[in-house]
């Protein structure tokens, strides 16, 4: 009886181990398939096969995909850190870590490309006039917030990669691949640091509907102004805007201690002292000149 029980326990133990291994193999297979799928999608996004969505519903769907992927990257990162602590010289654990890192790299790059797709879609919404300008500005704010989350997540993954890359030669190729993909973040960086300005006389501002007239003297920014008419700048690369006018008036809202006007009798330029403060309330600078 005792012998039979021991045999049964041994059998169940073997069966449990087999089931556990089967589950691990299934997870690995699923991860590999997902990596292949994401890699194909990344290739399509990079080549321009799919670089923007056609409507707001699809735009929102893409936003949710990005949010979900960021959560999944968090989960994967936690798994990698736990495995790395227990790795020692276990080859199987090392293979698992490599697979998880590959998944993280591919998914993060997918998010970068999707974020740029949102940006291209946003520009299309503006140029096609399919959305009210207020709605476009809401999307722009959401897009900037989303991209900032992606860049913050990238910093976390940077630290994890650097730590793991120090632990063995086998990780260095994967780390180098990650660094190449990371270079695309310059595109995202430029998106969130791109602002716009328009310079014109009162008549020009009114004629192009850049501003609205409250009364004979007071002008305010027009929420429905055509953004295509504005000039774009990268704020960290350009903090000086050339002017040549006897009188300059900023129609858009910018804190007075965030900029200075250069010149006495003739204003030759606007110098942005603190770009974060200057662009805090709006992405659009409107300057009235005489």
Image: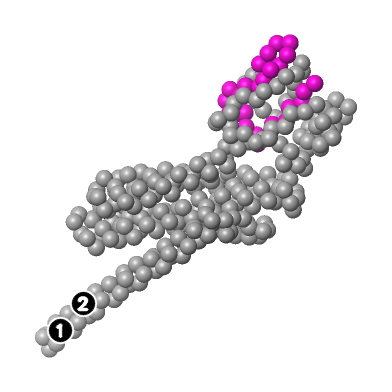
Asked if 219 appears above or below 118 in the picture, the reply is above
* In this picture, residue 25 sits left or right of residue 240: left
The answer to whether 53 is drawn above or below residue 154 in the figure is below
Report whether 239 appears left or right of 200: left
The image quadrant that residue 280 belongs to is top right
The residue that disc 1 covers is 7
Q: Is residue 245 above or below residue 230?
A: above
Q: Earlier in the sequence, mark 1 or mark 2?
A: 1
Residue 136, percent across and down? 69, 47
Residue 194 occupies which quadrant of the picture? top right
Label 2's element?
helix
> Dot 1: what SS?
helix
Query: What residue appears at the point 32 percent right and 71 percent down from the top-left corner?
Result: 25
Q: Which quarter shows the C terminus?
A: top right
Q: Which residues are magenta?
A: 262-290
**For this view, does 145 lie left or right of residue 99?**
right
- The numbered mark at residue 13 is 2
Q: Is residue 285 magenta?
A: yes
Residue in the picture at 12% in, 89% down: 1
Residue at image x 77%, y 23%?
A: 289
Neighbourhood count class around disc 1 (C-alpha, 10 Å): few under 14, some 14–19, many 20 upward: few
- Residue 253, given in percent of the width and then of the height, sits at 70, 30
Q: Position of residue 191 (x, y in %)?
A: 58, 42
Q: Which residue appears farthest toward the left when viewing the image?
A: 3
């Amino acid at each position: 009886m005792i012998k039979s029980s021991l045999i049964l326990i041994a059998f169940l133990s073997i069966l449990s181990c087999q089931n556990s291994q089967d589950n691990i193999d299934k997870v690995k297979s699923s991860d590999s398939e997902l990596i292949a799928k994401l890699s194909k999608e990344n290739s399509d996004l990079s080549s321009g096969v799919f670089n923007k969505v056609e409507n707001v519903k699809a735009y929102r769907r893409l936003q949710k995909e990005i949010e979900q992927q960021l959560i999944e990257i968090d989960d994967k990162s936690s798994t990698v850190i736990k495995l790395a602590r227990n790795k020692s010289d276990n080859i199987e654990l090392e293979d698992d870590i490599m697979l998880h890192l590959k998944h993280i790299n591919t998914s993060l790059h997918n998010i970068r490309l999707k974020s740029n797709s949102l940006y291209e879609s946003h520009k299309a919404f503006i140029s096609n006039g399919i959305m009210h300008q207020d709605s476009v500005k809401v999307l722009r704010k959401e897009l900037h917030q989303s991209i900032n989350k992606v860049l913050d997540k990238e910093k976390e993954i940077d630290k994890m990669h650097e730590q793991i890359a120090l632990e063995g030669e086998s990780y260095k190729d994967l780390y180098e691949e990650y660094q190449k993909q990371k270079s695309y973040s310059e595109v995202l960086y430029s998106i969130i640091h791109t602002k716009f300005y328009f310079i014109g006389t009162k008549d020009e501002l009114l004629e192009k509907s850049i501003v609205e007239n409250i009364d004979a003297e007071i002008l305010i920014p027009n929420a429905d102004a055509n953004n295509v008419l504005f000039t774009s700048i990268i704020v960290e690369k350009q903090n000086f805007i050339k002017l040549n006018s006897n009188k300059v008036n900023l129609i858009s809202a910018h804190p007075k201690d965030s900029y200075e006007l250069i010149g006495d009798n003739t204003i030759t330029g606007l110098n942005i002292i603190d770009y974060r403060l200057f662009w805090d309330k709006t992405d659009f600078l409107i300057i009235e000149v005489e």
